[in-house]
Every structure is written in structure tokens, then in C-alpha cells.
Amino acid sequence: MRANNRLPDELRPIKIKPDYLDFADGSAYIEIGKTKVVAAATIEEKVPHFLKNSGTGWVTAEYSMLPRSTEKRNVRERGQSRLSGRNQEIQRLIGRSLRAVTELNVLGEKTIILDCDVLQADGGTRTASITASCVALALSLKKMMEKNIIDQMPLKHLVGAISVGIVEGEILLDLDYNEDAKAEIDMNVVETEKGQLVEIQATAEKNPFSRKELSSLLSIANKGIKEIIEVQKEVLKKKSLLFMAYG
């Protein structure tokens, strides 16, 4: 029996609050079950050295977990020399996911940084960060359009993400921490509102898995991401982001 008597293909309760922070260029707070993440966008008038004089912008991300986001205190990371391999991998995933749906040439030579801070972790923090970051990015781009910094919306698709897995032989959607800890197969899926795949991270924790199981995992992930993106759409519509290329 899952926590809260959830069905195998049922998401945890999800809530997204836009413009959660007063001073960020765009921000979003997400709750999915007990997992809570804040994503904040910052627009900078510069790009990485490899994009200088290219006329093209950049979208990137940073990710961290607050020390008491988990049952035991995490050591706070200070400076890049202390950044864990896990955090590096997650923030690169977030950045790739957002760049895949953004026309970077529309930005000009500007960088948008998405800072994702996990307030409380109960599984799915990377996928929640992607979902919240997409909303924060959209709001920051809306602000750029309102200020006539850009003349069109660079975000061509919404993107959402979810975890799936096989736990005790059963395929489950949106794993919480206890389910993730004992999963035989653990997978994170990133997808657009059109059902296009952006990234798949799949690992056999115990035994190899079949292509049939992979197909079933992708199918249940697609169902969950569609539901998540509907929440994103409702949030953004309330912020007058009706012109976006929703599928």
C-alpha cells in the first residue's frame, strides 16, 4: 500500500505558486507531496565565454538542498570546490531541460540563471526543480517582453518532469523517498507538453530490465507529466501568459 493510499499511476498532490519571491526576475514554489522546492530566475547581462560575440543567450541552473531539508542534516556546500557530484549532475540536467525548449538566439547575449533550492526532500527533487524552473523561466521571459528587452517569447514549449520506477515488482508513478530507496528500477523522465522526450535517466538498481518494462515506465511517466503540465498551464494563464505555444 502506497502512502495516502495512492494508486500506482497517481501523482502526489501538486501545487505551484508563481512569483513566490518578491525580488527575483521570475520565481515559482512547488509542492509535490512532501517535497518542496523554490526556483528563482535571475537575468544577467553576460554569457559564458564560449558564447561571447555570438548574439546568443544561455540558460543555466544551480541546485542545492537546505541543510534540514532531510531527516538528517546535510552539510552546506560552500563554493564550487565543495559542490557534490550529485548536485552538479542535477543542475546540469535542469539547465539542459530548459535550454531544449528555449530559443536562445532570441535572448541576445544574456544569461538566465535558475536557482533551485530544496526546502524539503521526500523524493523527486530534481524533477520538481525542472517543473518549477520552467514556470520561473516563463515569468522572467514575460518580464523581458514587458520591458521590450525581447520582442517574442523564446520559450516554445512547457517542460515537466517526473520520477517512475519498479518497486516490489510494481510500476509506480512519482516515487516518494521510501519508494525510491527500495526501487528495483529508478527512472526520471523530462518531456514537453507535446509529449516529446527531452531526457530519460534510467537505472537498474538490482537487476536488468526489459524493453517492455521500459515502454511501460515511459507510458506512465507520460501520463504524469501531462497532468503536471496542466497545472503549469493554469498557473501561467493566471499570469496572462496565454500567447505561449501550448500543445
Image (cartoon, rainbow, N blue to C red):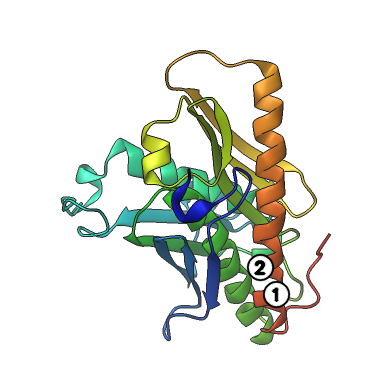
Identify residue for label 1.
234
Identity of the amino acid at label 2? Answer: Val
Q: Quadrant of the C terminus?
A: bottom right
Query: Which quadrant holds residue 39?
Result: bottom left
Q: Is residue 246 above or below residue 98?
A: below
Crowding near the residue tagged with mark 1, few <14, some 14–19, many ≥20 C-alpha atoms within 10 Å: few
Kindly check if marks 2 and 1 are in contact, taking CB atoms under 8 A apart as contact.
Answer: yes
Instruction: Give neighbour class at mark 2: few <14, some 14-19, many 20+ (Cα, 10 Å).
Output: some
Q: Residue 221: where, in percent of width, then height? A: 65, 42
Q: Which mark is residue 34?
A: none
At horizontal 58% and vertical 16% (from top left) the residue drawn is: 209
Q: Residue at x 66, y 68 (%)?
A: 231
Q: Residue at x 53, y 62 (%)?
A: 133
Give the labeled residue for mark 2.
231
Q: Could you give the CA–CA distance between mark 2 and mark 1, rounded to whole angstroms?
A: 5 Å
Q: How many marks?
A: 2
Which of the two residues, 66 or 245, is positioned nearer the viewer here? 66
Say above or below: 243 vs 112.
below
Q: Quadrant of residue 220?
A: top right
In the shown orientation, is residue 118 left or right of residue 93? left
Could you say where residue 167 lies in the image, as x and y percent from the top left?
Answer: 49, 31
Kindly identify the residue that appears in the image at 26 percent across and 60 percent down. 66
User: Residue flagged by tag 1: what amino acid is it?
Assistant: Glu
Identify the secondary structure beneath mark 1: helix
Q: x, y (%) of residue 96? A: 56, 45
On the picture, is 174 further left or further right than 242? Answer: left
